[in-house]
Image: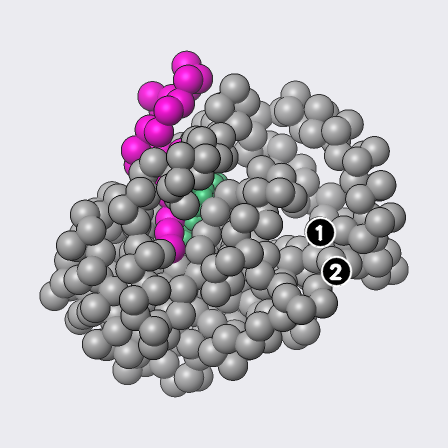
Amino acid sequence: MGKYDGCKVESMIYPLLRKALFHLDAETAHEYTATLLQTAMRTPGALAMLSRVYAPATRGLGQSILGMHFAHPIGLAAGFDKHGALTAGMAALGFSHVEVGTVTPLPQAGNPKPRLFRLPEDQALINRMGFNSDGMHVVADRLTQRPRHLPIGVNIGKNRDTSLADATSDYVKCMQTLAEHADYVAINISSPNTPGLRQLHETSALRELLQVIRAHNQWQRPIVLKISPDERADQLEQVVGTALDVGIDGIIATNTTITRPNLHSALQSEAGGPTHTRARAHYRRRGHSECPGRVSAPPCRCKSRPTLHGAGVRGAGSGHAAQLGAGSAYAS
Ligand SMILES: Cc1cc2nc3c(=O)[nH]c(=O)nc-3n(C[C@H](O)[C@H](O)[C@H](O)COP(=O)(O)O)c2cc1C
C-alpha cells in the first residue's frame, strides 16, 4: 500500500522486524508492536512521518458507504486494536478504517495465556483470545481522541459471565456507551471463543437482539452484523433475511472459522479459530473465493440482497493478498 519510499523502507525493515518479532511468542509480539505504535503516537511528528511513508495511492478507490467515506477498501478488522488505543497509529499506517474491539461492557481478562499461536508452516494463526477487553467505559474514553478523517467502527460483544438470556442487555449497554464515539457499530455474534455466543444466530434470538439494539440506536449510527462462516447455507440465508427485516445496515462476513482447513502444524489441535492465509490462496486457485471453512459462506448470498451492505474480512498475508479483497464493498 505504501508509495515508492514506503515500499523501500518496508522491504528493508520489515524482514528484520519480522525475524525479531518471531523470537517472541505471538501475543507478546503483538503487545510489543502496539507499544511501539503508542510510543510513536506520543512522539511529536512521528505519526506525520509514518503517514508520509505509508500514504497509500488511493486514486479511484474511494467509496462512500452508509454515510462514511472510505479512501480505499483496506481497513483493520476487529481483534488488533481491541481496546481503542491504536486508532491514530493505524490511520497513519494507511488503513482506510479501523474497527475497534470486540469491546465488552465490563473489563475482562479473556482466556488464560497462551491463547494466540503462530503456525508458520501454514502461514496461520490460531486464536482463542476470548474477548480480553478493557471494558466499554475505558474504550469510550479513549475513542474521544480518535482521528476524525477516517471511519472508526466499534465492535461490541457480551461478557463471558453474562448468560445468553441476558446478552441483549450487554449489547445495549455497549451501544449506549460506545456508539457516540464511533462512526458505525458492529454486532459480534460470531466469535468462536465465547461459549454459546454463536447461538445468537438462531432466528428468534437474533430478531429480538437486533430489534432491541436498533431501538437503542440513539446516535443513529449504521449497525452491521458480524456473522460466522460455519453456519449452514440455509441458516445463513435466515440470518441475512432476519437482519434485512429488522433494518440492519450491513453484514461483515465473516469471523474466524472453527474448522481446520488443510493445516499441517503440530499446533493445529489448539482450540480456537484459525486464520489461514495459505489455505485461502489454495482454495482461490481452485476457484473458491473463500477459505475452506467458508466455501458456502455468505458473501455471495449478500450480493443477492441489494439493500444490505457487505464487508469481507480476510487475513492478508501480503500486499497481493490484500488486493484480492478489493472487490468487496469494503474489505478489512
Ligand atoms: C488474534 C485475533 C483476534 C481477533 N479478535 C476478534 C475480535 O475481538 N472480534 C471480532 O469480531 N473478530 C476478531 N477476530 C477476527 C477477525 O476480525 C476476522 O474476522 C477474521 O480473522 C477473518 O477470518 P480470517 O482470518 O480467516 O480471514 C480476531 C482475529 C484474530 C486473528
Q: Residues within 10 Å of mark 2 (few under 14, many from 20)?
A: some
Q: Is residue 87 above or below residue 247?
A: above
* Magenta run includes residue 263: yes
Ligand 1 within 8 Å of disc 1? The answer is no
Residue 146 in view here: no
Please give the name of the residue rendered at 42% of the width and 76% of the height, measured from the top-left corner: 222
Q: What residue type is labelled 1?
A: Met
Q: Is residue 206 above or below residue 287?
A: below
Q: What stretch is highlighted in magenta?
A: 253-276
Farthest residue, direction left: 204
Tell me which corner region of the image, top left, top right, bottom left or bottom right, holds residue 295.
Answer: top left
Q: In this image, 10 relative to 228: left or right?
A: right
Q: Where is residue 268 in the image (x, y as percent from the top left)?
A: 38, 22
Mark 2 = which residue?
57
Dominant secondary structure (helix, strand or loop) of the stretch shown in magenta:
loop
Q: Position of residue 1 (x, y in %)?
A: 71, 51
Q: Where is residue 113 in the image (x, y as percent from the top left)?
A: 45, 30
Q: How crowded is mark 1: few (under 14 residues within 10 Å), some or many (20 or more)?
A: some
Residue 281 in view here: yes
Ligand 1 within 8 Å of disc 2? The answer is no
User: Between 70 and 81, which is closer to the camera in this rendering?
Assistant: 70
Mark 1 = which residue?
1
Cα separation between marks 1 and 2 = 7 Å
Q: In this image, 274 relative to 26: left or right?
A: left
User: Between 283 and 68, which is closer to the camera in this rendering?
Assistant: 283
Q: In this image, 75 relative to 105: left or right?
A: right
Please give the name of the residue rendered at 29% of the width and 67% of the height, measured from the top-left corner: 304
